[in-house]
Image (cartoon, rainbow, N blue to C red):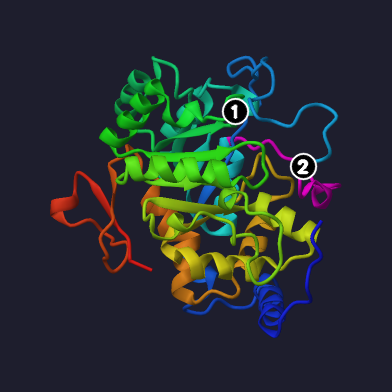
């Protein structure tokens, strides 16, 4: 594990601000408690195993094999409740924590590609949930399935996960059949949510994702867990080896989650400084928060409090992007999202009449 330098005065100040925020100080105009949040990453799990049976298959491709060391950040989750939240519980927690809407990410390790529970949940709570399904990009049936679900369930996106193949390629990104899936996503304005495996930094994986992003520049591509930056302290905080092309690739967004916070806590690296670095490099309009409830341990209240601490070094406007506007703009019920690479002011709400059918997400140049 890299040796962590002593925190700077700015980092120490961020820690103090975070404590004040978590302690329940009254919300100011630029405080995260002054607006409703958007949670970009939550996994639902039903208690009705008869109607929604758990996936009997092997672990997903790219997962750590049996006998491997614990995943990074695992130690800070010991002793905390590892919840499998139902839709009804989540709605109650959202109300308690000031979260307006969230992206329901299909939990592949629980259900595989059987997306019925998140589809049913999003249909039952259309004002709160945005469904992001998991399918196999190389399955010839996937493009048709996506087209059907846009119409019948108004899905917001699809999540892809995968590792490097034995020959060194990434067929789940760029095989001929996978490209047909990408084209369907592009045609319908869906968001592509993705996490490469295993959960360690890979410059190769990020370079391949960048190539695909350039091929489909209108598609919002959300990298889960900030793209798994390496555990490192100042000044790079793990982003130094990211491909430079990601800096100006406006359709690539970065989602920071409890998974990242667990890793940083384990390494004793201040999360507020890391998020400040990410915003400085990519822009707040390209970064969103996701609780990772249903995968990471802890209560929903704890996860929102940790997010509040992580944004302590951001301005009020940056906090609003990270905790609300970026995710709200990227995950839209029924799709219809487009990224414009030109330099505009920001994300604009509400839609103009000309944009009523297609949400245009305008990205400010960095």
In the rendered image, the residue lying farthest to the bottom is 9
Q: Nearer the viewer, residue 183 or 256?
A: 183
Numbered disc in front, either 1 or 2: 2
Task: Residue 238 in the image: state x and y as whole percent.
Answer: 64, 60
Mark 2 residue element: loop
Q: Residue at coordinates 70% horizontally, 85% vertically from top-left? A: 9
In-image side of 1 versus 278 (left or right): right
Q: Residue at coordinates 49% horizontally, 62% vertically from top-left? A: 322
Is 27 above or below relative to 50?
below
Task: Residue 58 in the image: state x and y as whole percent.
Answer: 69, 18
Quarter of the N terminus within the rendering: bottom right
Q: Nearer the viewer, residue 40 or 123?
A: 40
Measure the C-alpha gap from mark 1 to mark 2: 18 Å
Q: How many marks?
A: 2
Is there a contact, CB below 8 Å, between mark 1 and mark 2? Answer: no
> Is residue 75 part of the magenta span, yes or no?
yes
Mark 1 residue element: helix
Q: Residue at coordinates 45% horizontally, 32% vertically from top-left? A: 173
Which residue was labeled with disc 1? 108
Residue 309 visible in the picture: no
> Is residue 355 part of the magenta span, yes or no?
no
Q: Which mark is residue 71?
A: 2
Residue segment shown in magenta: 71-86
Count neighbours of disc 2 (C-alpha within 10 A) and say few if under 14, some if 14 to 19, many if 20 or more: few
Task: Residue 293 in the image: state x and y as whole percent.
Answer: 64, 44
Task: Residue 113 in the image: state x and y as whole percent.
Answer: 53, 21
Is the stretch drawn in magenta largely helix, strand or loop?
Answer: loop
Residue 138 visible in the picture: yes
Quarter of the C terminus within the rendering: bottom left
């Amino acid at each position: 594990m890299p040796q962590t330098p002593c925190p700077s005065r700015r980092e120490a100040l961020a820690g103090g601000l975070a404590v004040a925020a978590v302690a329940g100080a009254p919300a100011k105009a630029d405080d995260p408690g002054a607006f409703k949040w958007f949670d970009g990453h939550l996994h639902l799990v039903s208690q009705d195993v008869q109607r929604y049976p758990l996936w009997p298959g092997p672990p997903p491709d790219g997962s750590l094999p049996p006998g491997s060391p614990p995943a990074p950040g695992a130690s800070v989750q010991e002793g905390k409740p590892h919840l499998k939240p139902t839709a009804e519980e989540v709605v109650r927690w959202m109300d308690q924590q000031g979260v307006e809407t969230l992206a329901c990410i299909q939990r592949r390790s629980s259900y595989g590609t059987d997306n019925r529970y998140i589809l049913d949940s999003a249909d039952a709570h259309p004002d709160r949930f945005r469904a992001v399904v998991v399918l196999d990009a190389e399955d010839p049936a996937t493009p048709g399935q996506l087209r059907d679900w846009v119409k019948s369930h108004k899905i917001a996106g699809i999540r892809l996960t995968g590792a490097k193949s034995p020959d060194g390629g990434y067929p789940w990104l760029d095989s001929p059949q996978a490209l047909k899936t990408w084209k369907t996503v592009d045609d319908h304005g869906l968001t592509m949510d993705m996490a490469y495996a295993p959960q360690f930094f890979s410059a190769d994986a990020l370079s391949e994702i960048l190539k695909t992003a350039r091929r489909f520049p209108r598609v919002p591509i959300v990298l889960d867990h900030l793209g798994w930056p390496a555990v490192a302290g100042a000044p790079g905080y793990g982003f130094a080896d990211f491909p430079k092309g990601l800096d100006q690739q406006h359709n690539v967004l970065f989602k920071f989650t409890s998974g990242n916070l667990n890793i940083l806590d384990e390494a004793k690296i201040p999360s507020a400084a890391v998020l400040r670095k990410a915003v400085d490099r990519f822009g707040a309009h390209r970064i969103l928060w996701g609780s990772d409830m249903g995968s990471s341990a802890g209560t929903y209240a704890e996860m929102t409090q940790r997010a509040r601490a992580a944004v302590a070094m951001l301005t009020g406007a940056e906090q609003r992007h990270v905790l609300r506007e970026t995710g709200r703009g990227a995950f839209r019920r029924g799709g219809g999202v487009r990224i414009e690479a030109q330099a505009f002011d920001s994300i604009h709400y509400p839609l103009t009449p000309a944009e009523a059918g297609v949400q245009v997400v305008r990205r400010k140049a960095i």
